[in-house]
Amino acid sequence: MQTTDITHEIRTFLVENFLFGRGENLADNEPLLGNVVDSTGVVEFVVFLQERFNVTVEDEEVTAENLGSLQNAVGFIERKLRQNT
Amino acid sequence: MCGIAGVLKSTGSTAESGELRRMIAALPYRGPDANGIHIAGAAGFAHARLSIIDLKSGAQPMSTTDGRLWITFNGEIFNYLELREELVNKGYSFATRSDTEVILNAYREYGEDCVKHFNGQWAFAIWDTTEKKMFLSRDRAGVRPLFYAQTKDSFLFASEIKALMACPEVPREFDPVGMDQIFTFWATLPPRTAFRQISQLPPGHSMNVQGDCVRVKQYWSVPYVEEGDSRNGNERARAEELLHLLEDATRIRLRSDVPVGAYLSGGIDSALTTALIRKIASDRLRSFSLTFADAEFDESPYQLEASAFLQTQHSSVSCSQADIAKVFPDVIRHTEHPLFRTAPAPMYLLSRLVRENGFKVVLTGEGADEALGGYDIFKEAKIRRFWGRNPESKWRPLLLKRLYPFLPDFQRQPAANLRHFFRVTAEDLESPFFSHLPRWELTAKLKMLFAADFQAEIGQYDAMQELRETLPSGFRSWSHFGQGEYLEAKYFLPGYLLSSQGDRMAMAHSVEGRYPFLDYRVVEFGAKLPTRLKMKVLNQKYLLKKACEGLVPESILRRPKQPYRAPEGKCFFDENAPDYVKELLSPDAVEKAGVFDKRAVSILTSKFAGGKVGSLKDNMGVVAVLSTQLLASQFVN
């Protein structure tokens, strides 16, 4: 899967689910946790990542380094996909 | 408890009875027992009466015996008997037994300072026929509402906005800045309201209107102090002092010529209020409560236990999701304000139950959380500040799990996420709004739902900056706890809670709520209390619990705090949901109202329509959009 595809998929999910479709509000480096993704939304975000990309996300992996921005989330998924192959 | 309305013509013309009739006719539920209108030249008053004190001779508008002063009054002056005696000793005579006449004579004696002598809940206007001056006032806590508008030739006032809108010259438009404030703080910053050119008199304020000159003056504010009163005195003595105050606050709130009932929620505050009524009045007391089919919200076991312990004759009404959806349009007609939760809807059903049982007056436990350290937002702020002092600590943020035990979605969160949501930065720690930042920032995200044109009208306006500029001098030196209490008591309590769940829902069924915890003596006691006696470590309302010992069941004292909540967004997406929901949330209706972006609303509602429960933000969003759409259909051209 290409980086641009992963970025598009995650961006679309975030924009539709947390920003009411207002995509102009989401920069690649915009903080996600506790900002775009609210306190109860993180489970939804993690479930989406697991189901869409067929990866497992552990609780301790919910960190700013992994999911703190769109950019970081894309990198995290790319690493996970590499591990799976 | 009543509805009031009035007009003062600034151009010298005479007030018109037709206009006054139209205004008061908009508020029939506030005063089903009698109506009155009086015109004195440029000024005219209207009154809809709910008779509670002096049933025979308390009709309004009322005048002094010499006919110089006229009054229209909504509310109660609970210490009217003491004031009356004081005034009689000063030579005043009375033609009635009402508290209304006490206001008139107190005004004659003390002038505008008369309100400083009152202990009660009021909104009134007095017309001085000699000086051609109108004096209006609203109680300290903001229990009773008072709105006003100025047109090119009139000053208009009323208990509710809909009475002002009965006058054709008053615009029926949303105020984008007011809406921006509501979509931040849940309430506007008074005098602003959700509607353009309609203002509210802030709690603790009076105003003078003479000709076209309007002057507003604050007569009371909560006396917060730096770190609480550090006077020595053991906890037991302080608890007894608090209990004594509450007992007297309850005693004077039992003054009524009709029977008084009590709300019993299952929590400490209403249990204590009920216990104090039982202690003062020996009659068998009637109590009322809400129950929910959904166990997440239901508190009926505690209600029944309290009722049995306090030997009340108890009645309850069950509230379902369908009930909430069904009555929501009526609820919004009464709140006249966008909502973020459905909680007022069950309160609407509760006041109906009270009225159906023949009661016009109830005492409730409202106000204890603000004055005595009860709200979870205070606990949340304490934990966040404790963590913020050592942000690298691994274990301090674990305390976040102690928050909101009643929210299953919250408890399911990975601790890592809670750390991000409640993150504390150095900048946050310096903010005067530290306690409220998570709530306000979450709410403000809903502004993403605004339509581009509506947002353009708001422009670069910054609600928090406006609030920052209005903070009292010395605010930064107050205790952090006191700062949070101030924001809650000054804005959220009167601007959202008391209006949407207090006055408006009770009055919808012609029921008067009375609130012993909002007696100004109790509020002032709380403001001066050291923080450690309000929340000991994380034990909320610590001193109040001490005061309650032996008076309320032990199990209620020990139970974890469960704030009153009701089912939210999912109420409106059941297959049997009322037709209005789909109609008002349709792209056409959203576009027509002009507040929200139709695609954004469609994305939001499709989550619920697809069976999802939605996040906290989504639930707030759905309730906010639907309530605003209802307001648009009911109030806006």
Image (cartoon, coloured by chain):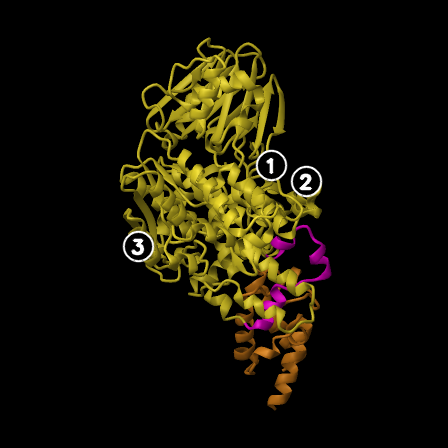
Give the chain coloured orange. Answer: A
User: Which region shows up in magenta?
Assistant: B414-438
Is B580 on the left or on the right of B168, as rendered?
Answer: left
Compute the Cα span from label 1 to label 2.
Answer: 10 Å
- The residue sitting at 61% across, 64% down in the picture is B421
Is B282 on the left or on the right of B101, as rendered?
Answer: left
Secondary element at image label 3: helix
Return the residue at label 3.
Answer: B304
**In the depicted structure, whether residue B432 falls above or below residue B416:** above
For residue B145, the mark is none
Compute the Cα span from label 1 to label 3.
Answer: 38 Å
Residue type indicated by callout 3 = Leu
Q: Nearer the viewer, residue B294 or B483?
A: B483
Labels 1 and 2 share a subunit: yes
Return the residue at label 2.
Answer: B472
For residue B221, the mark is 1
